[in-house]
Image: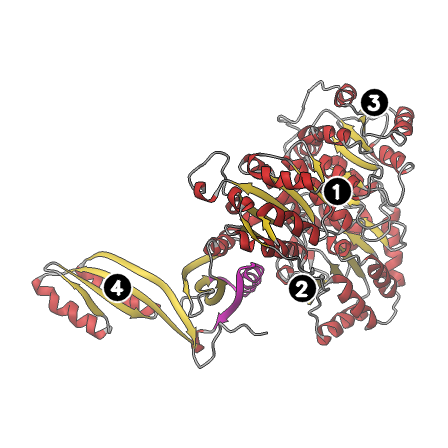
Amino acid sequence: MKKGQFILSVLVANHAGVLTRVSGLFSRRNYNIDSLNVAVTEDPLFSRMTIIARGDQTVREQITKQLSKLHDVKKIELLTPEKTVLREHLLIKIRVTKKTRGEIVESVNIFRGRVVDFNIDALTVEVTGESDKLDAFIKFVSQFGILEMCRAGALAVKRGAGNDNKEEE
Amino acid sequence: MKATGTKVIIETLIEQGCDTVFGYPGGAVLSIYDELYRHSDKIRHITCAHEQGAAHAADAYARVTGKTGVVIATSGPGATNLVTGIANAYLDSSPIVAITGNVPLSLLGKDSFQEVDITGVTMPITKHNYIVKDVNELADVIRETFFIAQSGRPGPVLIDVPKDVQTAVCNFEHKKTVKKERECFVTEEQLLLAAKLISQSEKPYIYCGGGVVISQAGEEIAKLAEKTDSPIGFSMMGLSAVSADNPYWLGMTGMHGRFASTKAHSEADLIIAVGVRFSDRATGNRAKYTQNAKVIHIDIDPAEINKNISVHCSLVGDVKEVVTKLLDRLEKKTNTQWMDAVQRMKNLETMRSDGDSAMHPEDIIEKVMEYTKDSTIVATDVGQHQMWVAQYYRFKKPRTHLTSGGLGAMGFGMGAAIGGCVASGGKRTVLFTGDGSFGMNLIELATAVTYSLPLVIILFNNGVLGMVRQWQHAFFDSRYSHTTLDRKTDFVKLAQAFGAAGYRATDIKTLEEALENAFKIQGPTVIDCVIDKEEKVYPMIPPEGSIDDIITR
């Protein structure tokens, strides 16, 4: 996690327009989103958003409270990094030559990534992990030439057996 | 029973206790209007001249009655014309439900005739909005909109209903309405902390806002003032919450607040803020705001706590509930020195402006007060006249002051006066406006004539956009760029052309004659009060300023 960053896990109603409501709130109140990920949960009525945002304590408090006011937002949790499993996903296309292929594949293995597409002059690799790990991998392979890359926002769940989707009544 | 979408709409409105709606017919709401035609015995429809006027009227209706105001408009331009009215209701926490028609489902997203994505447009200015694509969901959505509009901090909600959803058929049964509960989330520790801060303070100040009006907690605030021996200052939205006859009343605080109210606000060692959101117009420079004072914040909206001002103690809940609980935990105290100091501040109040009018704005307002009752609804537009009314008009009863606070929307007044008058059961209603503001929505005079609404329209006519001009005078070396209107409008003839009565008042005597007539006749009256363009609103604290920067003349 970078300085000032925090993770919000937001359970929202799963219907059209919810993403706009949430992202619109961020932009009009002048809050920054570093990443946002959304998909349906095990219950099709709800989606979960994982939002990485940035700001001091006051901003954190305001974002949480303003989000709570949205009718489609059912539950918000501010996740603490230590008690959270946080994953990002990277797809990256790297230029290869006969000479560099070995070193690149070795680095993919060290980073526990996988080669998902193999070509004579390019490799597409997927790597999963925390933000810092992906940054480190990107930095390393940049020397070979990055042809294209695509990085998904973070996903996060709390460690332990609890299920956040169950609303506390 | 089987019902069409429009039948569902009307039946659910009736179920929710709605007996009056404001609106304007059009292509995408033809079926709704057909249903209104058949139910005209149960729901009264006021046809305004423009959807903006209708939205302001619904907003004012909600402010006067406490019920949810309803406005209906067609798709496209009808819907976009509501936008200012909805934003106004949003910023002043007024519960309205806006129902718009839209093009049939199959034409949505095709840039069809009179198609606008109104839910997209109004997303930032509504508490929530809906586009209903399945008639089976319509009834519950309408119930939910009424609930959302009134729950917690009230506000506007919009429902967009495509044309074919209005005519589709579904099963419909009435349901019992859910009564709004007064919410309260305070803990004993918080209450005790508040009580401790109050008992330790020597110079407490109650800063009372619109939340007190909405929660109908004026009496509790009066008790709080008495028990804590503390003066009450008001945000503009809170002005009517406590009677101006109350000995603790100091009137409006802030940028154009009364001198003693603003001065006491800045010198207090404890600010008990109730139902307010610390608007920049009320606080001025926020860094200086809490230099000398601790703050207790009481509000229903948890997001308001620490939003604009960091507070020492917060009590979240319905203002009436919270203050009642707090009162039980307070000891009666006296702050003789402080109250004496406040009295000295009051003695220093010299607000009379120094223009060359034959009658000063405050003279006009005082004269009008001789004719109004405590219960008379007083609407204003936006600008200098609005501030003069806030400073000089002595409001006695809650929900009698209708003004555009947060949005500051010129043109609010005519719609508001109509909505307020209808809400009061057709009682004589006063509108203070200026020639600038009146020009924006004067077409609603036609509506007032049609429904024979007894509006007394006091037009402060100085031929300029007075408030903007005042800022040009203060901050732009009197370069009056485009604020001198030079319009040559004859407002007496204009009123007559609309079928209203019109008078011109150039001094107190002619004003009196005009008022004598205006307060007798059946329909609306416009009184064109000629004032000098050099009249200014004082005191004035420049934006981001503090009491040290106050300009008293």
Q: Which chain carries label 4?
A: A
Labels 4 and 1 share a subunit: no
Q: Mark 1 points at which residue?
A: B41
Identify the secondary structure beneath mark 1. loop
Query: Are dots 4 and 3 in contact, CB under 8 Å?
Result: no
Identify the secondary structure beneath mark 4. helix
Q: Taking B413 as reference, is B247 left or right?
A: right
Labels 3 and 1 share a subunit: yes
Q: In the rendered image, which quarter is residue A155 located in? A: bottom left
Camera-side residue: A16 or B508? A16
In reply to whether residue A71 is colored magenta, the answer given is yes
Q: Nearer the viewer, mark 2 or mark 1?
A: 1
Quadrant assignment for the N terminus of chain B: bottom right
Q: Residue B527 carries which label?
A: none
Can residue B92 be seen here? The reply is: yes
Crowd rating for badge 3 (residues with CA inside 10 Å; few <14, some 14–19, many 20+): some
Three-letter code for the amino acid on which mark 1 is drawn: Asp
Q: Tell me which label, 2 or 1, sits earlier in the chain.
A: 1
In reply to whether residue B15 is colored magenta, the answer given is no
Q: Mark 4 points at which residue?
A: A138
Crowd rating for badge 2 (residues with CA inside 10 Å; few <14, some 14–19, many 20+): some
Q: Which residue lies furthest to the left in this view?
A: A98
Write the start and end of the magenta stretch as one range. A54-79
Spatial separation of the CA atoms under disc 3 and disc 2: 50 Å
- Image coordinates for residue A138, horizontal then vertical, percent: 26, 64
- Image coordinates for residue A125, horizontal then vertical, percent: 21, 65
